[in-house]
Amino acid sequence: MLDYLVVGLGLAGISFCEQLERKGKSFKVISDNSQQASLVAGGLYNPVILKRFTLAWNAKEQLDLALPFYEELEKKLKVKLDYKIQVLRRFASAEEQNSWFEASDKPGLNYFLDQNIISNANTNLDSPFGYGQVRYTGRIKTKTLLERYTSYLNDKGLLVEETCDFDALEILKDEIIYKDMKAKQVVFSEGYGLKKNPFFNYLPLNGTKGELLTIKAPKLKESKVIKSSVFIIPLGDDLYRIGATYKWKDKTNLPTQESREELIEKLKTFLKCDFEVVEHVAGIRPTVADRRPLVGRHPEYNNLYVLNGFGSRGVIIAPYASKQLFQFIELGDKLNIEMDISRFTAKHYFG
Ligand SMILES: Cc1cc2nc3c(=O)[nH]c(=O)nc-3n(C[C@H](O)[C@H](O)[C@H](O)COP(=O)(O)OP(=O)(O)OC[C@H]3O[C@@H](n4cnc5c(N)ncnc54)[C@H](O)[C@@H]3O)c2cc1C
């Protein structure tokens, strides 16, 4: 009898497995590759919403948990995952500079926004109004994390690489049977794949497709993340990730010509040197109507749980939400009310 079965191995699944391992719980994971969000993500952690100069939801608390969490993972997997890198917000006008000054004075935001305006020193970037710098930012190499975690689980015989067959789940009062496995509880962390989960698909997960390009730009020589109409994220070796798009209709993981053109067009408004596109990827962000995660217990089955809805901030939300879920199940602690799925219980019964 396992303590847990975890369905879906993206940032959510990995973070929950880590709670389990660190607390000595037994588990197995079932996962396929139908969703790609954690694999293709830009991986940035940045506590500020750079469109509006506001703080992201609970960002400070999440960041304070996330950084030691990834540090532990680096030690365990013996791989570098966390790259501290500055994020510069390009200003489009003097008004934007003023809004930045105002924002950087506000409690909470003043911790993260540097008041100085940084002038542009890169001749291959057009930025006459300069930049504002965000503090305590960085990038987690999510693809490396996923690949290394997959091998780690495989080596321990804890990963079943298949699509969960929901019809094969036999839910009894004190246990769940799935094929040759038995567990006390199941945690579903399938990202946008939740849509196919008959137990939790009443939850309002919208899904927002995002596409990213990787370019090679030997003349650019930029070491910081530049945020304008698109992000430029330095990867090393003259490679940069460019993204991302936001599309609400198409729910496939397929890259499109339309998004490629959109990204290139936006990039060319401020990038002045030649570049070549070397990669193009797409994935679906698990976004929720009210922009809060979906975490908690099923309204009818007390041994089924969900961990989802991290939107475009999975890197910092995953460690926080998974810790909350673990303590909710094991210690009976209350979940942060804003992400507790009990806010949608009426939808389960009445649609
Ligand atoms: C283009 C793009 C850029 C992004 N950039 C950033 C960024 O810079 N910073 C940031 O913090 N976030 C970013 N995000 C968001 C981030 O990727 C997500 O918040 C996060 O990856 C979601 O993780 P998840 O584990 O919930 O879902 P997923 O990563 O989708 O993982 C779910 C896993 O479950 C599996 N699965 C699904 N259904 C089943 C099933 N029935 N049976 C078995 N397995 C199943 C899937 O195949 C997948 O492996 C970005 C997302 C996109 C698309």
Image (tube, rainbow, N blue to C red):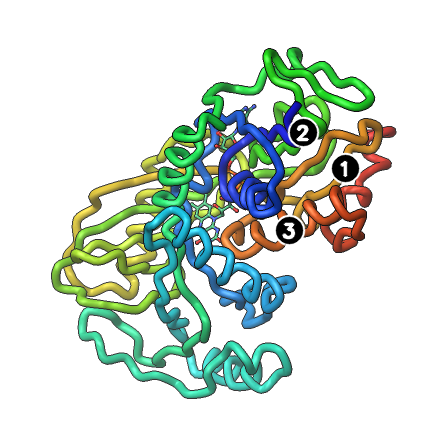
- The quadrant of the rendering that contains the C terminus is top right
Residue matched to label 1: 297
Instruction: Estimate the x, y position of residue 13 in percent, counting from the top left.
Output: 55, 38
Amino acid bearing label 2: Val
How many residues crowd around disc 3 within 10 Å: few (fewer than 14), some, or many (20 or more)? some
Lower sequence index among marks 2 and 3: 2
Give the quarter of the image for residue 181.
top right
Identity of the residue drawn at 78% across and 54% down: 337
Ligand 1: does it lie within 8 Å of the C-beta at label 1? no
Identity of the residue drawn at 47% across and 78% down: 96
Task: Tell me, yes or no, whether the two marked residues, 2 and 3, touch with CB atoms within 8 Å.
Answer: no
Residue matched to label 2: 186
As helix, strand or loop, the secondary structure at mark 2 comes to strand
Instruction: Estimate the x, y position of residue 157 in percent, counting from the top left.
Output: 45, 25
As helix, strand or loop, the secondary structure at mark 3 comes to helix
Seen in the picture, residue 203 relative to 179 is either above or below; the reply is below
State left or right for residue 233 relative to residue 322. Answer: left
The mark closer to the camera, 2 or 1, is 2
| Frontmost residue, 155 versus 35 | 155
Task: Tell me, yes or no, whether the two marked residues, 2 and 1, touch with CB atoms within 8 Å.
Answer: no
Give the Cα separation between the discs numbered 2 and 3: 16 Å
Instruction: Estimate the x, y position of residue 94 in percent, counting from the top left.
Output: 43, 83
Give the Cα separation between the discs numbered 3 and 1: 14 Å
Seen in the picture, residue 316 relative to 220 is either above or below; the reply is above
Residue matched to label 3: 323
Instruction: Estimate the x, y position of residue 323 in percent, counting from the top left.
Output: 64, 51
As helix, strand or loop, the secondary structure at mark 1 comes to strand
- The quadrant of the rendering that contains the N terminus is top right
Give the quarter of the image for residue 304.
top right
